[in-house]
Image (cartoon, rainbow, N blue to C red):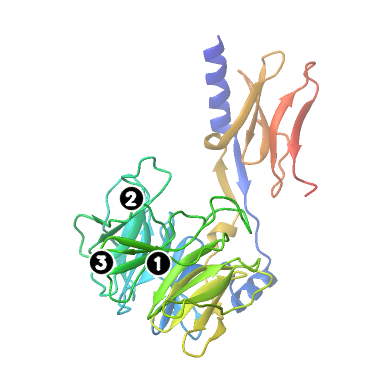
C-alpha cells in the first residue's frame, strides 16, 4: 500500500507539479541594459579583444568596448575562456557533451573542438607561454578528490600530461615556461570574505625542471590568482579587506598595491600581453601594465535574454523535502522554493505558496491536519 501511495504521489507531481519561473523585463529596463551590460564574468584579454562569459555563453568585444559578439549558444555552461598567446584561439571549459571538458574554438568563432574525455571537471587555466599546450586543473586522479592537480594538453588533442605539482588550482607559467606560480587550494567559489583561518590561500612557485619549491611571503590572508609577467608576479589579495591587485617583484622582494577598490572585490583577473582584465561590480576593467592605470571597458550585450523570460519547469527533479498528511491522503512537498500538496489517488496538485522570488522550505503538517508550517524568506 505504501509503495502504491508514493508512486501515485510522484506521478501526480510529475504531471501537475510545474512552476513558472522568471519575470519579464520592462521595456525601460531593457533599454537601460543595452547601454552597459553587467554581470560579465571570467574575462580574458588579447592585444585587440576581450572575451568573457555572460549568461553561461562566451562573448567577445573590442578592448575599447562597444557591442559584444556571441561565440557560443549552447544551453550548458561555457566558462573560463583563455586566449592563446597569438590571440587566434580561445580555450574554455564547456558542457557540450554533458561533462565539463576542455574545448578550443577559433577566436573569430566556429565549431568548438573537444580535447578532454574524462568524467571529471576539467577547468581551463590558460596556455603555455609558447602557445603549444593548454593548461587546466582537474581532480581526475586526486585522492581524495577534494583537491585538483595541473595538466596540459595540445590544442590538437591527444593524452593530457600531468605536471609534477602535488596539488594546485589557480596557476600561471613563468615567461620561459620552466616554473609555475600557483595556489595550492581553491577559494575562487567560496562565499566567505576576509577569511583568516587555516585554509587561507598563499602563492607557491614550483620549478618544473629542478623540482624545487619556494613561496611568496605569507600574510595569512587570501592571496589568489597569481599572474607571472617578466620578473614580477601579479595577484589579488584581501590583506586590506577588499580584494585588490598587487605586484610582487621577484628581484627586490617588494610587494606593491596597484588598485584601491573599497566597495567591490576584484574577481577573476587574467593576464594579457600588456594588461590585466578583471571584473569589479559586474563590469570589466583593464589595468594597463605600462601606464599603471585601470580603465573601464563599457560593453553592451544584445541578446534575447532567455534566462529572464518566464519558463515552465518540472518541479519533480527539484523536490527537496516531503511528508504525508496525518490521514495519509495527501503528500506535502517543497520544490523550487514553493510548497505543494498532491493527492495519494484522486485530485489535483496544489501550489500553496506560488511566490516567485521568495524561497519557502521545510514544510510540515500539523498533527490535526489543518495547518502547514514552513520557513520563508519573504521578509528578507
Chain-order first, disc 1 or disc 2: 1
Q: Position of residue 42 (x, y in %)?
A: 48, 66
Residue at left offset 35%, top offset 61%: 213
Q: Nearer the viewer, residue 168 or 322?
A: 168
With 177 as the anchor, is 250 left or right in this view?
right
Q: Earlier in the sequence, mark 1 or mark 3?
A: 1
Circle 1 — which element?
Answer: strand
Q: Quadrant of residue 325?
A: top right
Q: Earlier along the polypeptide chain: callout 3 or callout 2?
A: 2
- Regarding residue 141, the answer to whether it shows in the image is yes
| Residue 76 position (above or below residue 288) | above
**Mark 3 = which residue?**
133
Residue at image point 34% right, 52% down: 166
Residue 81, disc = 1
**49 and 132: which is toward the camera:** 132
Residue 231 at what x, y percent from top left?
A: 39, 80
Residue count near mark 3 (Cα–Cα under 10 Å), binned few <14, some 14–19, many ≥20? many
Amino acid at each position: 500500500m505504501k509503495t502504491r501511495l508514493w508512486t501515485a504521489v510522484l506521478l501526480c507531481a510529475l504531471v501537475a507539479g510545474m512552476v513558472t519561473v522568471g519575470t519579464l523585463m520592462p521595456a525601460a529596463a531593457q533599454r537601460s541594459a543595452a547601454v552597459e551590460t553587467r554581470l560579465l564574468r571570467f574575462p580574458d584579454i588579447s592585444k585587440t579583444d576581450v572575451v568573457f562569459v555572460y549568461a553561461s555563453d562566451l562573448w567577445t568585444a573590442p578592448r575599447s568596448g562597444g557591442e559584444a559578439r556571441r561565440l557560443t549558444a549552447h544551453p550548458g555552461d561555457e566558462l573560463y575562456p583563455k586566449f592563446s598567446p597569438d590571440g587566434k584561439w580561445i580555450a574554455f571549459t564547456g558542457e557540450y557533451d554533458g561533462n565539463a571538458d576542455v574545448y578550443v574554438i577559433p577566436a573569430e568563432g566556429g565549431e568548438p573542438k573537444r580535447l578532454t574525455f574524462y568524467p571529471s571537471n576539467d577547468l581551463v587555466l590558460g596556455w603555455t607561454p609558447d602557445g603549444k599546450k593548454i593548461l587546466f586543473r582537474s581532480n581526475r586522479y586526486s585522492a581524495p578528490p577534494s583537491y585538483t592537480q595541473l595538466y596540459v594538453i595540445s590544442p590538437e588533442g591527444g593524452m593530457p600530461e600531468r605536471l609534477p605539482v602535488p596539488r594546485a588550482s589557480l596557476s600561471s607559467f613563468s615567461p620561459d615556461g620552466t616554473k609555475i606560480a600557483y595556489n595550492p587550494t581553491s577559494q575562487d567559489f567560496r562565499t566567505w570574505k576576509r577569511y583568516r583561518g587555516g585554509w587561507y590561500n598563499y602563492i607557491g612557485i614550483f620549478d618544473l625542471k629542478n623540482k624545487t619549491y619556494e613561496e611568496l611571503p605569507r600574510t595569512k590572508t587570501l592571496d589568489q590568482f597569481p599572474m607571472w609577467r617578466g620578473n614580477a608576479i601579479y595577484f589579488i589579495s584581501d590583506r586590506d579587506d577588499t580584494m585588490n591587485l598587487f605586484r610582487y617583484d621577484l628581484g627586490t622582494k617588494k610587494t606593491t598595491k596597484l588598485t584601491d577598490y573599497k566597495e567591490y572585490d576584484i574577481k577573476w583577473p587574467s593576464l594579457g600581453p600588456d594588461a590585466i582584465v578583471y571584473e569589479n561590480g559586474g563590469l570589466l576593467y583593464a589595468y594597463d601594465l605600462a601606464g599603471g592605470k585601470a580603465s573601464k571597458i563599457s560593453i553592451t550585450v544584445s541578446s534575447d535574454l532567455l534566462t529572464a523570460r518566464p519558463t515552465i519547469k518540472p518541479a519533480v527533479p527539484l523536490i527537496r523535502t516531503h511528508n504525508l498528511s496525518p490521514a495519509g491522503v495527501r503528500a506535502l512537498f517543497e520544490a523550487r522554493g514553493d510548497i505543494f500538496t498532491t493527492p495519494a489517488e484522486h485530485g489535483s496538485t496544489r501550489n500553496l505558496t506560488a511566490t516567485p522570488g521568495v524561497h519557502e522550505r521545510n514544510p510540515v503538517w500539523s498533527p490535526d491536519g489543518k495547518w502547514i508550517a514552513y520557513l520563508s524568506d519573504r521578509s528578507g
